[in-house]
């Protein structure tokens, strides 16, 4: 099973429609669910101590949704980038590894300030989606599209061309 664990609520109906469409497409290959945890208001995030508090609070909520046996791929600017073919291979490998551990493959999108230290430590892998900056809501769609694309590649389908 794949889970996409996101900090913050999906507020955009058009993007939610795309999320639903990709979840439906991916479900032809594996079980998938999108989960949300509450984000923190960041009215004073410019203060270093407040930013750390916010990231740590959000990380605690994410960590509460993870099991020890889950394989956690954290979306992070310090992560590794793959092209679509490489990502498809990684996706297959990650699913196998998660299955051997008795867990799920969990992709995590942290809050707008980034991941807390505990979440960084808990992640098994870090994935940088792009050098570009995207909203967190759009990132959900992009991740799901890449997961779908990865399955299409793994199953020899021509969607990715």
Image (tube, grey):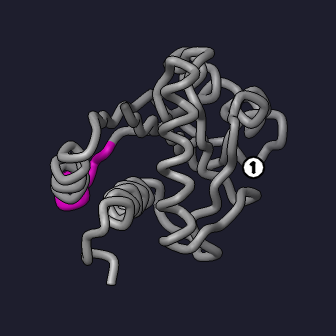
Residue 117 is left or right of residue 115, and the answer is right
Residue name at image x 57 percent, y 42 percent: 110
Q: Picture coordinates of residue 20 (x, y %)?
A: 18, 49
Residue at the image point whose x is 83% and y is 42% from the top:
48
Q: Which residue is mark 1?
A: 46
Examine the rendered structure and indicate whether residue 139 appears above or below residue 112: below
For residue 138: magenta?
Answer: no
Q: Residue at x 75, y 27 (%)?
A: 118
Query: Residue at 53% of width from left, 30% of height from top?
Result: 98
The outermost residue toward the right is: 48
Asked where in the image residue 72 lies, by quadrant, the reply is top right
- Mark 1 nearby-residue class (10 Å; few <14, some 14–19, many ≥20): few
Asked whether 45 or 101 is in front, the reply is 101
Percent position (x, y) of residue 74? 62, 44
Q: Residue furthest toward the bottom?
A: 161
The quarter of the image holding the C terminus is bottom left
Q: Which residues are magenta?
A: 10-16
| Residue 50 visible in the picture | no
- The answer, for residue 54, to whether it is visible in the render is yes
Q: Is residue 60 left or right of residue 102?
A: right
101 vs 7, nearest the viewer = 101
* Residue 65 higher or lower than 83, as above or below: above
């Amino acid at each position: 099973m794949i889970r996409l664990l996101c900090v913050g609520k999906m507020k955009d109906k058009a993007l939610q429609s795309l999320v639903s469409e990709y979840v439906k497409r991916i479900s032809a290959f594996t079980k998938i669910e999108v989960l949300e945890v509450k984000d923190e208001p960041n009215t004073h995030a410019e203060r270093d101590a407040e930013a750390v508090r916010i990231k740590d609070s959000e990380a605690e909520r994410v960590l509460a949704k993870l099991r020890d046996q889950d394989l956690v791929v954290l979306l992070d600017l310090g992560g590794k980038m793959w092209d679509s073919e490489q990502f498809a291979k990684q996706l297959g490998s990650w699913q196998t590894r998660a299955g051997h551990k008795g867990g799920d493959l969990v992709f995590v999108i942290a809050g707008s300030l980034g991941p807390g230290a505990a979440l960084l430590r808990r992640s098994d892998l870090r994935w940088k989606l792009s050098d570009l900056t995207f909203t967190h809501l759009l990132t959900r769609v992009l991740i799901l599209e890449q997961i779908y694309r990865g399955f299409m590649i793994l199953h020899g389908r021509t969607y990715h061309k």
